[in-house]
Image: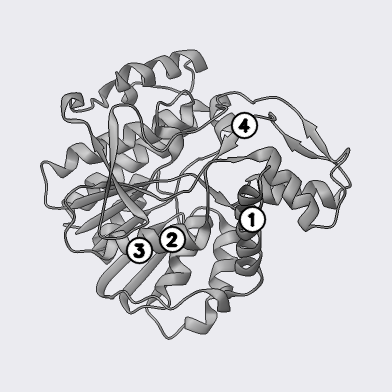
């Protein structure tokens, strides 16, 4: 590991640590949402709660926070009690519940939606593809359609680098949503904005919390391969960029990524984390092999795409190359998927839809 890589990883770890310890490190946000009624799905998750924290430093009309995870939503509500004079609503519900979502849109008429709710763990979704289809694709489609019906102005979707040349169920579901939402932009007044980025350092279920638990239990840190790399960004930086994108009135294009820097070897991250935590490196790292659906290396764009600058130096457009235009995506085959279908059958349908 060279000095630049070491310095970069250490800065990421220190930044993550500061954010976890005290919210005073959240910067002021010079964005105006004063005319917006904002709905955040998956509000108690990593990105949803991060967007919420930053929005509390701005002005908004109403903030509707929904999640189907009772305890995390309760903890978020308790954390935000100091803001009880603001128009903040905490709603325990599931984005897959169409009746509930119809009632919610009808009641609040959100002008802006941040759709962060999703299943994201690659090996888990390889084993449960039907659940990935229900939440990641069908619920997203239903919410997008509701946004159109209710004249929502902006719908911001959180994607992933795993949607690039996807081999996993999770990556395929996200890529299908990217394409569906891009298709909607050509037909309707609601603006669908898609943000595609890599791993959030310290997010729920990611490497850092796992490393912390393994150390606490006296176990070695598990790394899938000495060669595996991932793109990383802090929660704070990702959420800042998402809000910047949502706050602009006009964009030339609608698919974005962030300046993620160079990919980092997970074994280097583990090595730095051990040193940062005061542990010896020797015998404290165990190689366990890639898990189902995982790649050695992720990408931020495919060979059929190109990156172009925006007005923000760390936010980039992702554009299809002019000779690589794709046909509108057809979701009808996905609607036929049932819980009884074999895993390989569901995966084959998703592959066909993306061709």
Dots 3, 2 in contact, CB < 8 A: yes
Q: Position of residue 166 (x, y in %)?
A: 43, 26
Q: Residues within 10 Å of mark 1 (few under 14, many from 20)?
A: few
Q: Position of residue 46 (x, y in %)?
A: 53, 56
Q: Name the residue located 32 percent from the left edge and 26 percent from the top edge.
A: 335
Where on the picture, by quarter, is residue 59?
bottom left
Is the image coloured rainbow, by chain, by secondary structure, or in one colour? one colour
Q: Name the residue located 58 percent from the left edge and 52 percent from the top edge.
A: 201
Dots 1, 4 in contact, CB < 8 A: no
Q: Which residue is mark 4?
A: 228
Q: Which residue is mark 1?
A: 7
Q: Specify the label residue 202 is tagged with.
A: none
Using residue 241 as the reference point, say whether residue 317 is left or right of it: left
Q: Which residue is mark 2?
A: 239
Q: Residues within 10 Å of mark 2 (few under 14, many from 20)?
A: many
Where on the picture, by quarter, is residue 183?
top left
Query: Disc 3 to disc 4, how far (Cα)?
Result: 31 Å
Q: Position of residue 246 (x, y in %)?
A: 29, 61
Kindly state the secondary structure of the residue where label 1 is placed: helix
Q: Specify the label residue 243 is tagged with.
A: 3
Q: Nearer the viewer, residue 258 or 77?
A: 258
Dots 1, 2 in contact, CB < 8 A: no
Image height of 42 relative to 184, above or below: below
């Amino acid at each position: 590991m060279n000095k630049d890589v070491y310095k970069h990883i250490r800065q990421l770890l220190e930044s993550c640590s500061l954010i976890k310890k005290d919210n005073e490190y959240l910067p002021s946000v010079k964005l105006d949402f004063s005319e917006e009624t904002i709905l955040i799905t998956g509000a108690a998750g990593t990105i949803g709660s991060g967007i919420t924290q930053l929005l509390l430093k701005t002005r908004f009309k109403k903030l509707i926070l929904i999640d189907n995870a009772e305890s995390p939503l309760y903890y978020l509500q308790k954390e935000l009690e100091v803001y009880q004079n603001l128009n903040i609503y905490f709603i325990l519900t599931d984005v897959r519940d169409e009746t509930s979502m119809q009632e919610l849109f009808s009641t609040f008429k959100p002008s802006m939606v941040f759709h962060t709710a999703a299943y994201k763990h690659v090996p888990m979704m390889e084993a449960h593809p039907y659940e990935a289809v229900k939440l990641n694709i069908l619920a997203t489609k239903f919410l997008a359609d509701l946004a159109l019906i209710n004249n929502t102005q902006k719908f911001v979707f959180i994607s992933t680098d795993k949607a690039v040349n996807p081999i996993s169920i999770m990556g395929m579901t996200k890529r299908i949503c990217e394409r569906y939402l891009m298709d909607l932009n050509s037909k309707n007044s609601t603006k669908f904005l898609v943000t595609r980025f890599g791993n959030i350092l310290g997010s729920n279920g990611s490497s850092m919390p796992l490393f912390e638990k393994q150390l606490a239990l006296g176990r070695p840190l598990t790394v899938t391969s000495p060669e595996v790399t991932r793109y990383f960004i802090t929660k704070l930086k990702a959420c800042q960029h998402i809000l910047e994108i949502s706050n602009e009135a006009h964009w030339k294009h609608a698919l974005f990524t962030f300046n993620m820097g160079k990919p980092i070897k997970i074994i280097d991250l583990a090595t730095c984390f051990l040193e940062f935590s005061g542990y010896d490196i020797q015998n404290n790292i165990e190689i366990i092999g890639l898990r189902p659906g995982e790649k050695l290396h992720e990408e931020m764009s495919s060979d059929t795409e190109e990156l172009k600058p925006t007005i923000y130096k760390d936010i980039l457009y992702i554009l299809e190359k002019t000779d690589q235009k794709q046909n509108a995506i057809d979701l009808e085959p996905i609607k036929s998927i049932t819980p009884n279908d074999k895993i390989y059958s569901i995966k084959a349908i998703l592959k066909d839809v993306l061709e």
